[in-house]
Structures are given as structure tokens and as C-alpha cells.
Amino acid sequence: MIRQLAIWLCLGLLLMQCTSGGSAELGAEPDNLVDEDKMVDILTETHLSESRIARLAIGSADTSALLFKRLHTQTLKKFDVDTASYSQSFVYYSAHPDKLAKIYEEVVDKLKAIEKEKAAKAGKQKILKPQ
């Protein structure tokens, strides 16, 4: 799972660099910067969405991409963040590796907590089901 996070991070960084308008300096803080705590929540939900799509084992990359885009849009709406603000904030944090590393440490911690919680629920369900 950590490897998938790293791959998606690298791809995201590459995509953000390619789509960046270049008008603003890369390290400059955007006016609509998403705060670090909200960014942690958005990235956690984003990686959970990626995981859900991967578990579906959809054969078509196009279908997977469309589904991910829809889930990502829903995630941004959930946290009341527009796509431009998210993209600019991600580019900003990418230009500041210390901040991005801190954010991703929290993302990984949250994902591990979610994984533990699901494992605990699965263990309880096994105990409750008669065999």
C-alpha cells in the first residue's frame, strides 16, 4: 500500500508539473492554499478511493480513470475545496518537500488506523458468526 502511495504521489507531481500554467513561481504560496489538515483529509480520501477502484479490478483503464475522477470530485466537494485550489496547493506542497512529507506521514498514519479498525471489525464479525 505504501508503494502505491509513492507511485501515485510521483504521478501526481508529474501531472501537476505538466499542467501548471507556469505563470506563478513554483514555491510561491497560492492565495487559495488548502491548509495542511484539510490536505491530509483530502489525500486520505483520495487514496481510499484509489484502493476501492483497484479492488474492483476494472479491465478498462479509461473506466477506472473516469470512476476515479468522479470519486475525487466528490471528495473535493465533501471538503468544500475547488479543483484549482487543490491543484495549486498540491503544487505548492510539492515544492516544499518538508511540508509534503509531514502531510504524507499523517496520511499514512490515518490509513493505518483505518486498516486496523477494519481488521478489528472483521475479527469481531468472525467471532459473532457461528461456524
Image (cartoon, helix red, strand yellow):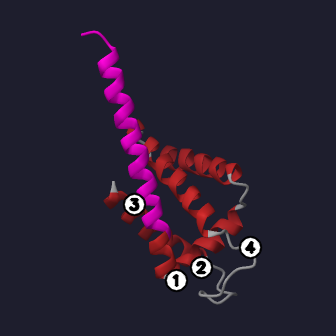
Q: Which residue is mark 1?
A: 96
For image coordinates 36% across by 43% down, the residue present is: 116
- Spot the residue most to the left: 131
Callout 2: few (<14), some (14-19), or many (20+) C-alpha neighbours within 10 Å? many
> Would you call the spot at circle 1 few (<14 residues within 10 Å), some (14-19), or many (20 or more)?
some
Callout 3: helix, strand or loop? helix
Q: Could you give the CA–CA distance between mark 2 and mark 4, rounded to whole angstroms?
A: 11 Å
Which residue is at the front of the view, 124 or 115? 124
Q: Which mark is residue 92?
A: 2
Q: Earlier in the sequence, mark 2 or mark 4?
A: 4
Q: CA distance from mark 1 to mark 4?
A: 16 Å
Q: Are marks 1 and 2 in contact (CB under 8 Å)?
A: yes
For the stretch drawn in magenta, what is the main secondary structure? helix
N-terminal of the two: label 1 or label 3? 3
Q: Which residue is mark 3?
A: 5
- The residue range painted magenta reads 103-131
Q: Which residue is found at the position 56% from the left and 47% from the top?
A: 66
Classify residue 16 by image quadrant: bottom right
Name the residue at 35% across, 29% down: 122
**Alpha-carbon distance for marks 1 and 2?**
7 Å
* Observer able to see residue 54: no
Spatial CA distance of label 1 from label 3 is: 18 Å
Q: Is residue 35 above or below residue 51?
A: below
Check disc 4 and report the residue beneath it.
32
Label 4 crowd (10 A; few <14 / some 14-19 / many >=20): few
What type is the residue that disc 2 sits on? Tyr
